[in-house]
Image (cartoon, rainbow, N blue to C red):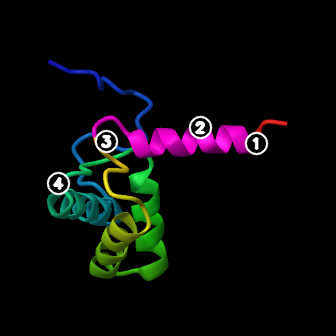
Amino acid sequence: MVVSNPLPHSPRPLYEEEPPFVSSLRRVLLAVSVVREDIQYYQGMNLLAGWLLIVMMDEEKAFWTLAALLQYSFPEQYFDTTLSGVRVDEVRERRRCDP
């Protein structure tokens, strides 16, 4: 019996291992979520972590830099479950951009 690929336009077969960069990115994000239990994950964190991995080319340095950015560049509870800090910034930026 032949089973068709559920994603026929998939760029790679489903059974392949993920590329090393993706594995590094996954480990950095997982480590940050363990260290900063209050944050877990927010949209776009993968872009920042990925950029750090590309620039630094070192998983541990990327992790510590991301952890420091999240701790020292954003106010406490910025990324809480309500995203209250993000919402305040969004309103502030909209007001700044409105003519």
Contact, CB < 8 Å: mark 2 with mark 4?
no
Q: State yes or no: residue 94 in magenta.
A: yes
Q: Residues within 10 Å of mark 1 (few under 14, many from 20)?
A: few
Q: Of the residues shown, which amino acid type is indicated by label 1?
A: Cys
| Residue 86 falls inside the magenta stretch | yes
Amino acid on which the number 3 mark rests in the picture: Pro
Report which residue position mark 3 lands on: 13
Residue that protrudes farthest toward the right in the picture = 99
Q: Mark 3 or mark 1, which is nearer the start of the sequence?
A: 3
Which residue appears at 33% of the width and 59% of the height?
22
For the record, the magenta segment spans 81-96
The picture quadrant where one finds residue 46 is: bottom left
For the point 85% across and 36% down, the residue is: 99
The amino acid beneath tag 2 is: Val
| Label drawn at residue 97 | 1
Callout 2: 10 Å neighbours few (<14), some, many (20+)?
Answer: few
Task: Identify the element where label 4 is drawn.
Answer: loop
Badges 4 and 1: C-beta atoms under 8 Å apart? no
Instruction: Check disc 4 and give the amino acid type.
Output: Glu
Closer to the N terminus: mark 1 or mark 2?
2
- Residue lying at 26% horizontally and 61% vertically, measured from the top left: 23
**Residue topped by disc 4:** 37
Decide: is 69 above or below 41: below
Residue at which label 2 appears: 91
Disc 3 or 2, which lies upstream in sequence?
3
Distance from the alpha carbon under mark 3 to that under mark 2: 44 Å
Upstream in the sequence, badge 4 or badge 1?
Answer: 4
* Contact flag, marks 3 and 2 (Cβ < 8 Å): no
Q: Nearer the viewer, residue 68 or 52?
A: 68
Instruction: Single out the mark in the foreground, 1 or 3.
Output: 1
Quadrant assignment for the N terminus: top left
**As drawn, 88 above or below 20:** above
